[in-house]
Image: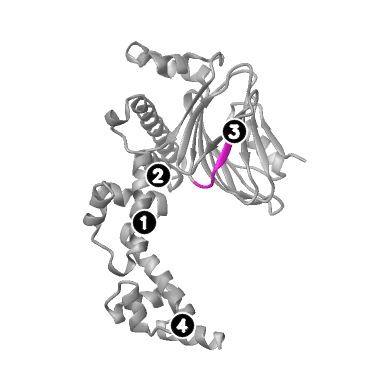
Amino acid sequence: MKNVLSISTVHIDETINGMAKFFGVHVDRENNEVCFELSKEWGKGYINGFSFTHGVSVIDVDIRLRKDVILEFQNPSVEPLQLLYNKEDNLGHIFSDTETINQINRLECIMVASDIASHQCLYIGKDTSVCMFLININRREFENKVEDFLPGMNKDLELLFRDINGVNRFFYQGYYSLDIAESIEAFTDCELTDFPKSVFLEGKVYEILGHQLRQYLDDRNSPERRKILRTSTVSAIEKAAQLIEENLDQVESILTLSKKVGLNQNTLQQGFRHIFGKSVNAYIKELRLKRAKNLMETTQMNITEISYAVGINSRSYFSKIFKEKYGMTPKQYVLNSRNKAS
């Protein structure tokens, strides 16, 4: 049996209420924000909705489901423009009149709008970590917002925003930029309350939209003329992480590492925070401690040998950071693990 969650409105209150009803939970409301947490029957996590002026709204999703769910968008009155940012596991997207599933990878975004002959669906698999940020733009209400900018607007963007009846289908996909990632993080981590929070969040939504439109236009250039780093940045960050792992006993400086993967130091640091949630040095430190712990459990090496093997030349410093991480000294951990093994 398929679990199909149908959304037939562009209004955020009705959308979140419908989703909460599907999952069998109650909605909490505060100012322009509506939210709910999943029940244990369905999994864990939360879904938040935010409404702003000119038909702009946001759905912030961070869940792990126990069952497969198809999220079906059916909007009979207006076909919104949607910007979806996927921060975790892969998602599947499909238009109802095709059989082609578009895979949305981690750190990818899609800009999408259905036409009047179809609707779109998202496939969310069970035990999948779903962390996505979805901006909905009701183009009928948003038209007043862009009216003053039409004389100088790119013609493709003008057609996109003025297609309030959904005559033309639109689909764009690509890795989103670090600027967008930082703006999304600022939105989700906002600690303001009441009116200041609402103003701040709305500003961030337009900041994301501005970055996204700039990126969309930039992608229309030939690769050598593009100014915004996306896919290449992600690949370079992953290559840097691989170099660190392969040479953990003698990791090079951040400057040397960044040159090897073709990035500057700031981009390398931003990329690590974006992908791994920590700085380069913090990533190296955590990787060293994990490998040291594994060596203690699987080898007969002594503490000094292990410390050198993971690239830490000071035994006292190694002991200090190991205890901070695992709550006991390396010596205590070795004794405990080897006594259990014997």
Could you say whether the residue bearing mark 3 is in a helix, strand or loop?
loop
Residue 91 lies within the magenta run: yes
Query: Which residue type carries mark 4?
Result: Tyr
Query: Which residue type carries mark 3?
Result: Ile
Check contact, mark 1 vs mark 4: CB within 8 A.
Answer: no
Residue 31 placed where, x, y %? 53, 38
Mark linked to residue 101: 3
Whichever of labels 1 and 3 marks the residue nearer the N terminus, that label is 3
Please name the residue shown 41% across and 86% down the image.
331
Residue 211 placed where, x, y %? 36, 32
113 lies above or below 246: above
Q: Dividing the picture into quarters, in which one does residue 174 lie?
A: top left
- Work out whether residue 228 or residue 142 is closer to the camera in this orientation and state it: 228
Q: Is residue 224 left or right of residue 95?
A: left
| Location of mark 1 (residue) | 241
Q: Dividing the picture into quarters, in which one does residue 290 lie?
A: bottom left
Q: CA distance from mark 1 to mark 3?
A: 31 Å
| Location of mark 4 (residue) | 333
Q: CA distance from mark 2 to mark 3?
A: 31 Å
Query: Which residue type carries mark 2?
Result: Ala
Residue at the limit of the structure toward the top, as seen here? 151
Please name the residue shown 30% across and 74% down the image.
312
Q: Nearer the viewer, mark 1 or mark 4?
A: 1
Whichever of labels 3 and 4 marks the residue nearer the N terminus, that label is 3
Q: Nearer the viewer, mark 3 or mark 4?
A: 3
Could you say whether the residue bearing mark 4 is in a helix, strand or loop?
helix
- Work out whether residue 76 or residue 229 is closer to the camera in this orientation and state it: 229
Whichever of labels 1 and 4 marks the residue nearer the N terminus, that label is 1
Mark linked to residue 186: 2
Query: Which residue type carries mark 1?
Result: Ala
